[in-house]
Image: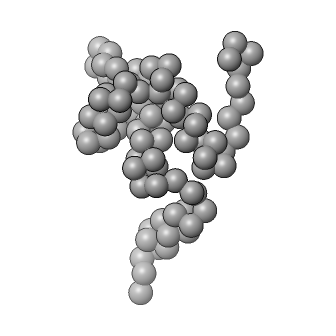
Amino acid sequence: MISKEKQIRNRLDEKIPLSRVQKRRLGGIIAVLSGREPVEEVSADLLSRGFIKPAPQSYIVTNDGLREKDRLSTLAGIYVQKSESD
């Protein structure tokens, strides 16, 4: 018998056409935007790619990170409304 959590994860994997790495990266950027700190492995990846940078007691998302969030969200089928300045 498959656990409820695994069933939900399997359904999400079928519906969201991102690789595991892309999902982790998007989740990490969203975590930082939400004021949370992503797990260390994800933080290290985001830092090395310039998507986040250290700030006092946390991280902030860079412009490149915001563009990556928009790109991955679009690939996942999530509509991202652009601001007038973009």
Identify which residue is drawn at 25% across, 39% down: 40
In the image, residue 25 sits, relative to residue 58, either above or below, namely: below
Quarter residue 37 falls in: top left
Left-right relation of 61 to 85: left
As drawn, the residue found furthest toward the right would be 84
> How far across and down, in percent of the image, does residue 46 sit?
35, 32
**Camera-side residue of 15 and 75:** 75
Identify which residue is drawn at 46% across, 55% down: 19
Q: In which quadrant of the rendered image does the N terminus lie?
A: bottom left
Left-right relation of 35 to 69: left
Task: Tell me, yes or no, if residue 35 can be seen here.
Answer: no
As drawn, the residue found furthest toward the bottom would be 1
Identify which residue is drawn at 27% across, 34% down: 44
Task: Tell me, yes or no, if residue 19 can be seen here.
Answer: yes
Q: Report the label total.
A: 0
**Camera-side residue of 6 and 82:** 82
Left-right relation of 85 to 47: right
> How far across and down, in percent of the image, does residue 70 sit?
59, 34
Identify which residue is drawn at 68% across, 17% down: 86
The image's colour scheme reads: one colour
In the image, residue 45 sits, relative to residue 12, either above or below, namely: above
> How far across and down, in percent of the image, does residue 67 sit?
55, 28
